[in-house]
Protein backbone atom coordinates (compact mmCIF):
# COMPACT_ATOMS: atom_id res chain seq x y z
CA UNK A 1 0.00 0.00 0.00
CA UNK A 2 1.36 3.47 -0.87
CA UNK A 3 2.07 5.66 2.14
CA UNK A 4 0.70 9.20 2.25
CA UNK A 5 2.40 12.05 4.05
CA UNK A 6 0.19 14.49 5.95
CA UNK A 7 0.30 18.24 5.31
CA UNK A 8 2.86 20.05 7.46
CA UNK A 9 1.57 21.69 10.61
CA UNK A 10 1.31 25.46 10.11
CA UNK A 11 2.03 27.94 12.88
CA UNK A 12 -1.25 29.28 14.18
CA UNK A 13 -3.11 26.17 13.06
CA UNK A 14 -5.59 24.16 15.09
CA UNK A 15 -4.52 20.99 16.92
CA UNK A 16 -7.12 18.51 18.13
CA UNK A 17 -6.39 16.73 21.43
CA UNK A 18 -8.01 13.35 21.93
CA UNK A 19 -8.06 10.63 24.61
CA UNK A 20 -8.30 7.31 22.72
CA UNK A 21 -7.16 5.15 25.63
CA UNK A 22 -6.82 5.94 29.35
CA UNK A 23 -8.70 8.59 31.31
CA UNK A 24 -6.82 11.86 31.64
CA UNK A 25 -5.77 13.90 34.66
CA UNK A 26 -7.40 17.34 34.34
CA UNK A 27 -4.46 19.34 35.68
CA UNK A 28 -1.92 17.59 33.46
CA UNK A 29 -4.19 18.04 30.46
CA UNK A 30 -4.46 21.79 31.14
CA UNK A 31 -0.69 22.13 31.48
CA UNK A 32 -0.08 20.23 28.25
CA UNK A 33 -2.64 22.31 26.36
CA UNK A 34 -1.00 25.49 27.66
CA UNK A 35 2.38 24.26 26.39
CA UNK A 36 0.94 23.80 22.89
CA UNK A 37 -0.66 27.25 22.94
CA UNK A 38 2.67 28.73 24.01
CA UNK A 39 4.07 27.44 20.71
CA UNK A 40 1.51 29.54 18.81
CA UNK A 41 -1.17 26.94 18.01
CA UNK A 42 -4.89 26.79 18.69
CA UNK A 43 -6.13 23.77 20.63
CA UNK A 44 -9.49 22.01 20.55
CA UNK A 45 -10.27 19.22 22.99
CA UNK A 46 -12.25 16.25 21.77
CA UNK A 47 -15.72 15.98 23.37
CA UNK A 48 -14.47 12.85 25.14
CA UNK A 49 -11.14 14.19 26.38
CA UNK A 50 -12.47 14.46 29.94
CA UNK A 51 -14.70 11.39 29.96
CA UNK A 52 -14.03 8.71 32.57
CA UNK A 53 -15.01 5.06 32.62
CA UNK A 54 -12.78 3.78 35.37
CA UNK A 55 -9.31 3.76 33.84
CA UNK A 56 -10.70 4.38 30.31
CA UNK A 57 -11.62 7.67 28.67
CA UNK A 58 -15.21 6.63 28.03
CA UNK A 59 -16.89 4.01 25.86
CA UNK A 60 -14.77 2.49 23.07
CA UNK A 61 -17.32 3.18 20.31
CA UNK A 62 -17.41 6.85 21.26
CA UNK A 63 -13.62 7.10 21.49
CA UNK A 64 -13.40 5.72 17.95
CA UNK A 65 -16.02 8.21 16.75
CA UNK A 66 -14.21 11.19 18.28
CA UNK A 67 -10.98 10.12 16.61
CA UNK A 68 -12.62 9.57 13.23
CA UNK A 69 -14.41 12.94 13.46
CA UNK A 70 -11.13 14.79 14.04
CA UNK A 71 -9.55 13.05 11.06
CA UNK A 72 -12.38 14.17 8.82
CA UNK A 73 -12.34 17.83 9.84
CA UNK A 74 -10.43 20.02 7.42
CA UNK A 75 -9.81 22.69 10.08
CA UNK A 76 -7.85 20.28 12.32
CA UNK A 77 -4.20 20.32 11.25
CA UNK A 78 -2.99 17.60 13.62
CA UNK A 79 -4.30 15.17 16.22
CA UNK A 80 -2.34 14.82 19.47
CA UNK A 81 -3.13 12.09 21.98
CA UNK A 82 -3.49 13.16 25.60
CA UNK A 83 -2.03 9.97 27.08
CA UNK A 84 -1.74 6.20 26.66
CA UNK A 85 -2.65 3.73 29.39
CA UNK A 86 -4.89 1.09 27.82
CA UNK A 87 -7.70 1.07 25.31
CA UNK A 88 -6.33 1.93 21.87
CA UNK A 89 -6.75 -1.58 20.50
CA UNK A 90 -10.45 -1.47 21.38
CA UNK A 91 -10.93 1.27 18.77
CA UNK A 92 -9.43 -0.60 15.84
CA UNK A 93 -12.44 -2.82 14.98
CA UNK A 94 -14.64 0.28 14.74
CA UNK A 95 -12.09 2.14 12.61
CA UNK A 96 -11.48 -0.92 10.40
CA UNK A 97 -15.20 -1.40 9.86
CA UNK A 98 -15.63 2.12 8.51
CA UNK A 99 -15.05 2.21 4.74
CA UNK A 100 -15.09 6.02 4.61
CA UNK A 101 -11.57 7.25 3.70
CA UNK A 102 -9.80 9.34 6.32
CA UNK A 103 -7.92 12.52 5.48
CA UNK A 104 -4.18 11.99 6.07
CA UNK A 105 -3.03 14.28 8.85
CA UNK A 106 -0.45 14.37 11.59
CA UNK A 107 -1.30 11.84 14.31
CA UNK A 108 0.89 11.87 17.43
CA UNK A 109 1.28 9.52 20.40
CA UNK A 110 3.22 6.59 21.86
CA UNK A 111 2.96 3.86 24.52
CA UNK A 112 -0.53 2.30 24.20
CA UNK A 113 -1.09 4.53 21.14
CA UNK A 114 1.49 2.35 19.33
CA UNK A 115 -1.41 0.14 18.20
CA UNK A 116 -3.04 3.06 16.37
CA UNK A 117 0.24 4.39 14.96
CA UNK A 118 0.95 1.07 13.27
CA UNK A 119 -2.64 0.36 12.22
CA UNK A 120 -3.03 3.74 10.48
CA UNK A 121 0.27 3.08 8.69
CA UNK A 122 -0.54 -0.50 7.67
CA UNK A 123 -4.26 -0.29 6.94
CA UNK A 124 -4.68 3.32 5.81
CA UNK A 125 -1.24 4.13 4.42
CA UNK A 126 -0.70 7.16 6.68
CA UNK A 127 2.60 8.41 8.05
CA UNK A 128 2.26 8.60 11.85
CA UNK A 129 4.43 10.00 14.64
CA UNK A 130 5.76 8.19 17.72
CA UNK A 131 6.17 11.33 19.79
CA UNK A 132 5.35 13.19 23.03
CA UNK A 133 1.78 13.32 24.36
CA UNK A 134 -0.15 16.25 25.80
CA UNK A 135 -0.93 15.22 29.38
CA UNK A 136 2.39 13.41 29.74
CA UNK A 137 5.63 14.79 28.26
CA UNK A 138 4.22 18.20 27.27
CA UNK A 139 2.64 18.69 30.68
CA UNK A 140 5.94 17.95 32.41
CA UNK A 141 7.99 19.97 29.90
CA UNK A 142 10.11 18.87 26.97
CA UNK A 143 13.84 19.54 26.89
CA UNK A 144 14.97 22.27 24.52
CA UNK A 145 16.41 19.75 22.06
CA UNK A 146 13.37 17.43 22.13
CA UNK A 147 11.04 20.42 21.70
CA UNK A 148 12.94 21.76 18.70
CA UNK A 149 13.07 18.30 17.19
CA UNK A 150 9.33 17.72 17.71
CA UNK A 151 7.95 20.99 16.36
CA UNK A 152 10.58 21.19 13.63
CA UNK A 153 9.65 17.73 12.35
CA UNK A 154 5.88 18.38 12.34
CA UNK A 155 6.13 21.79 10.68
CA UNK A 156 8.59 20.60 8.04
CA UNK A 157 11.24 23.02 9.25
CA UNK A 158 13.45 20.03 10.11
CA UNK A 159 13.28 17.87 6.99
CA UNK A 160 16.15 15.53 7.87
CA UNK A 161 18.23 14.75 10.93
CA UNK A 162 20.87 12.33 12.23
CA UNK A 163 21.33 10.94 15.75
CA UNK A 164 24.20 8.88 17.10
CA UNK A 165 22.66 6.20 19.30
CA UNK A 166 25.86 5.16 20.94
CA UNK A 167 25.77 1.37 21.20
CA UNK A 168 25.72 -1.21 18.44
CA UNK A 169 24.76 -4.84 18.99
CA UNK A 170 25.18 -5.76 15.34
CA UNK A 171 26.91 -3.41 12.92
CA UNK A 172 25.48 -2.84 9.49
CA UNK A 173 23.63 -0.46 7.21
CA UNK A 174 19.97 -0.43 6.20
CA UNK A 175 17.45 2.00 4.78
CA UNK A 176 13.72 1.37 5.21
CA UNK A 177 10.51 2.68 6.71
CA UNK A 178 10.28 2.60 10.50
CA UNK A 179 7.41 1.20 12.59
CA UNK A 180 6.98 -0.22 16.08
CA UNK A 181 6.64 1.33 19.53
CA UNK A 182 5.95 -0.11 22.98
CA UNK A 183 6.98 -3.78 23.06
CA UNK A 184 4.36 -4.95 25.57
CA UNK A 185 1.62 -3.26 23.54
CA UNK A 186 2.77 -4.54 20.15
CA UNK A 187 2.73 -8.19 21.25
CA UNK A 188 -0.98 -7.86 22.09
CA UNK A 189 -1.71 -7.48 18.38
CA UNK A 190 -0.29 -10.92 17.53
CA UNK A 191 -2.94 -13.41 16.51
CA UNK A 192 -5.48 -10.66 15.79
CA UNK A 193 -6.51 -9.27 12.39
CA UNK A 194 -4.50 -6.16 13.28
CA UNK A 195 -1.11 -7.67 14.09
CA UNK A 196 2.02 -5.75 13.24
CA UNK A 197 3.65 -6.41 9.86
CA UNK A 198 7.40 -6.02 10.32
CA UNK A 199 8.89 -7.53 7.15
CA UNK A 200 11.35 -5.16 5.48
CA UNK A 201 10.97 -2.52 8.22
CA UNK A 202 13.23 -0.78 10.68
CA UNK A 203 11.58 -1.95 13.88
CA UNK A 204 11.68 0.37 16.89
CA UNK A 205 11.04 -1.06 20.38
CA UNK A 206 10.83 0.50 23.85
CA UNK A 207 8.98 -0.12 27.12
CA UNK A 208 8.52 0.81 30.76
CA UNK A 209 8.19 -1.11 34.03
CA UNK A 210 8.78 -4.58 32.58
CA UNK A 211 11.20 -6.93 34.35
CA UNK A 212 13.96 -8.53 32.25
CA UNK A 213 12.24 -11.92 32.17
CA UNK A 214 9.14 -10.27 30.73
CA UNK A 215 11.22 -8.49 28.09
CA UNK A 216 12.79 -11.82 27.16
CA UNK A 217 9.38 -13.49 27.06
CA UNK A 218 7.98 -10.83 24.74
CA UNK A 219 11.00 -10.90 22.42
CA UNK A 220 10.64 -14.69 22.29
CA UNK A 221 6.97 -14.26 21.40
CA UNK A 222 7.85 -11.86 18.56
CA UNK A 223 10.54 -14.23 17.35
CA UNK A 224 8.26 -17.29 17.35
CA UNK A 225 5.60 -15.26 15.53
CA UNK A 226 8.13 -14.56 12.77
CA UNK A 227 8.21 -10.82 13.43
CA UNK A 228 12.00 -10.64 13.88
CA UNK A 229 13.03 -12.71 10.86
CA UNK A 230 12.92 -10.35 7.88
CA UNK A 231 13.63 -6.97 9.41
CA UNK A 232 15.75 -4.37 7.68
CA UNK A 233 17.09 -3.35 11.09
CA UNK A 234 16.23 -3.05 14.77
CA UNK A 235 16.42 0.05 16.97
CA UNK A 236 15.93 -0.11 20.74
CA UNK A 237 14.80 2.98 22.62
CA UNK A 238 14.42 3.53 26.34
CA UNK A 239 13.57 0.59 28.59
CA UNK A 240 12.65 2.67 31.62
CA UNK A 241 12.55 0.92 35.00
CA UNK A 242 12.98 -2.44 33.28
CA UNK A 243 15.93 -3.72 35.31
CA UNK A 244 15.90 -5.12 38.84
CA UNK A 245 18.41 -6.95 40.98
CA UNK A 246 18.15 -10.20 39.05
CA UNK A 247 20.95 -12.08 37.27
CA UNK A 248 20.00 -10.91 33.73
CA UNK A 249 19.66 -7.32 32.58
CA UNK A 250 17.60 -6.05 29.67
CA UNK A 251 20.80 -4.99 27.91
CA UNK A 252 22.29 -8.48 28.29
CA UNK A 253 19.13 -10.08 26.92
CA UNK A 254 19.11 -7.82 23.85
CA UNK A 255 22.82 -8.39 23.22
CA UNK A 256 22.40 -12.17 23.51
CA UNK A 257 19.30 -12.33 21.33
CA UNK A 258 20.68 -10.29 18.45
CA UNK A 259 24.45 -10.77 18.44
CA UNK A 260 24.24 -12.77 15.21
CA UNK A 261 21.21 -11.07 13.64
CA UNK A 262 21.34 -10.79 9.81
CA UNK A 263 20.54 -7.07 10.09
CA UNK A 264 21.92 -4.10 12.06
CA UNK A 265 20.80 -3.73 15.68
CA UNK A 266 21.42 -0.68 17.87
CA UNK A 267 20.46 0.49 21.35
CA UNK A 268 20.14 3.96 22.80
CA UNK A 269 17.51 5.86 20.81
CA UNK A 270 16.25 8.56 23.21
CA UNK A 271 12.58 7.83 22.57
CA UNK A 272 9.80 6.29 24.60
CA UNK A 273 9.12 6.49 28.31
CA UNK A 274 12.52 7.85 29.32
CA UNK A 275 13.74 11.33 30.25
CA UNK A 276 13.91 12.35 26.58
CA UNK A 277 11.36 11.41 23.94
CA UNK A 278 12.43 12.45 20.46
CA UNK A 279 9.82 12.20 17.71
CA UNK A 280 10.09 9.27 15.29
CA UNK A 281 8.05 9.31 12.06
CA UNK A 282 6.65 5.92 11.04
CA UNK A 283 6.27 5.21 7.33
CA UNK A 284 9.07 7.29 5.77
CA UNK A 285 12.58 6.27 4.81
CA UNK A 286 15.16 6.21 7.56
CA UNK A 287 18.75 5.00 7.43
CA UNK A 288 20.59 3.03 10.08
CA UNK A 289 24.36 3.08 9.55
CA UNK A 290 26.46 1.73 12.39
CA UNK A 291 25.18 3.63 15.42
CA UNK A 292 23.78 6.55 13.42
CA UNK A 293 20.05 6.81 12.71
CA UNK A 294 19.05 9.34 10.05
CA UNK A 295 15.75 10.63 8.75
CA UNK A 296 16.17 10.49 4.97
CA UNK A 297 13.12 12.51 3.92
CA UNK A 298 10.60 14.92 5.39
CA UNK A 299 7.58 13.09 6.83
CA UNK A 300 5.25 15.98 5.98
CA UNK A 301 4.34 17.79 2.78
Image (cartoon, rainbow, N blue to C red):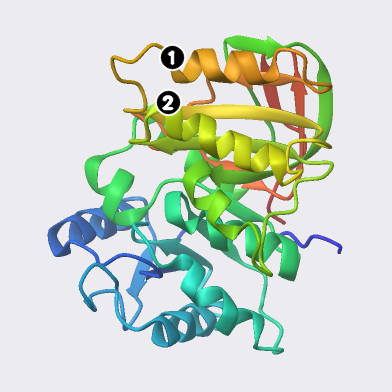
| Residue 247 position by quadrant | top left
Q: Is residue 31 above or below residue 120?
A: above
Residue 299 or residue 110, whichever sits in front: 110
Would you call the spot at circle 1 few (<14 residues within 10 Å), some (14-19), or many (20 or more)?
some
- Residue pointed to by mark 2: 212
Circle count? 2
Determine contact: label 2, label 1, CB under 8 Å.
yes
Residue at point 73%, 69% (across, down):
123
CA distance for labels 2 and 1: 7 Å
Would you call the spot at circle 2 few (<14 residues within 10 Å), some (14-19), or many (20 or more)?
many
SS category of the residue bearing label 1: loop
**Disc number at residue 248?**
1
SS category of the residue bearing label 2: helix
For the N terminus, give its image quadrant: bottom right
Residue 13 shows in the view: no
Q: Position of residue 183 (x, y in %)?
A: 52, 42
**Disc number at residue 79?**
none
Residue at point 71%, 89% (across, down):
99
For the C terminus, give its image quadrant: bottom right
Amino acid sequence: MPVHKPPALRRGGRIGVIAPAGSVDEQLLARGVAAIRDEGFEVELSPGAREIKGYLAGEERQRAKYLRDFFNRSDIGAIFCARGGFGSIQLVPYLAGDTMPLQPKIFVGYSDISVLLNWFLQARGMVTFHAPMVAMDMAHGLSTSAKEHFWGTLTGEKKTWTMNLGESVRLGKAEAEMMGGCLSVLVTTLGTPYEIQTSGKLLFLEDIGEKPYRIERMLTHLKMAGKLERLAGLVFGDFTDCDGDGPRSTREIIAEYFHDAPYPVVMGMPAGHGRENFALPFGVRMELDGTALSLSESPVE
